[in-house]
Image (cartoon, rainbow, N blue to C red):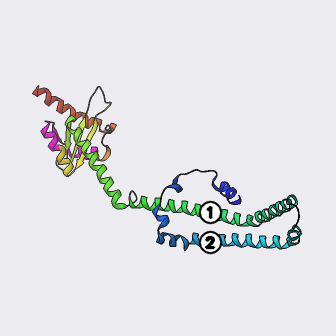
Amino acid sequence: IIALIANLAQVGFIFSPHPLTPDLDRINPVSGLKRIFSTEGLVRLLISILKIAIICYLSYLIIRKQLPIIFSLIGQDTGKTFSVATGLIFQLLLYLCIGMAPLAFMDYFFQKRRYEHQLMMSREELKEEYKQTEGNPLVRSRIRSMQRNIARLRMMQKVPRADVVITNPTHIAVAIEYDREKMNAPTVIAKGKGMIAEKIMEIARKNNIPLVENRWLAQMLYRLVEVGEEIPVKLYQAVAEVLAYIYRLKGKVV
């Protein structure tokens, strides 16, 4: 009864079919020895020994104290014998409850600490798993590399929409798009250095997009404007001159 009350006080009423599920580890001798000789197993063994000792000791004290009454029942009628026996059993149970209460509290605090330790271990395992995946520098580097590749691919897919690509002349390339109906100002849709710049210029040539060499403007656009952003006000004049030049060329072609 005390064990049941203590368990309900610790975790409440929980029904789980898991203990009914067959588990070969329960009949594995090696696993059994590990459980027995673990810290938890030794504490449980100690508590069980104390329980048995308390039960035996209290039973001995009460029975020894009540021996005269027990012997006096010899030859008495059944009703009186039953009444006295019931009283003795009730007294024994009462003393056992009082004697087992400290052990119940000990067991409660032990189980609580064990549960908190398991939670702590679970958190540590999660942290370790995080370190081995997202927290691992190599994994983080690979993730960033994949993200850069995806962003670069999307950027390259937008180059054919550009009105002009401003270069420096081979090290930097900045693709600019301007749609008067949809945009407040010309927008950088792609930019890059080195091999990326060469790829932007290659795509531009394949799609007949004009390449304009302007070292200062290419450097300023590359440094000040991110992909997807509109050009700053201080570069309006320079970009407008380039776009006007491109529009005049297209006008001549047309």
* Left or right of 39 in this view: 65: right
* Residue at 16% from the left image edge and 40% from the top image edge: 204
* Left or right of 145 in this view: 76: right
Q: Where is residue 189 drawn, in percent x and y?
A: 27, 39
* Residue at 47% from the left image edge and 64% from the top image edge: 25
The residue under label 1 is: 111
| Along the viewing direction, whichever of 51 and 201 lies nearer the viewer | 51
Disc 1 residue type (three-letter): Gln
Pointers 2 and 1 in contact (CB under 8 A)?
Answer: no
Q: Where is residue 217 drawn, in percent x and y?
A: 24, 43
Quarter residue 128 falls in = bottom left
Q: Which mark is residue 45?
A: 2
Number of numbered tags placed on the structure image? 2
Q: Closer to the observer: label 2 or label 1?
A: 2
Residue numbers of the magenta segment: 201-221
Disc 2 residue type (three-letter): Leu
Q: CA distance from mark 2 to mark 1?
A: 14 Å
**Helix, strand or loop for the magenta stretch, by majority:** helix
| Along the viewing direction, whichever of 176 and 105 lies nearer the viewer | 105
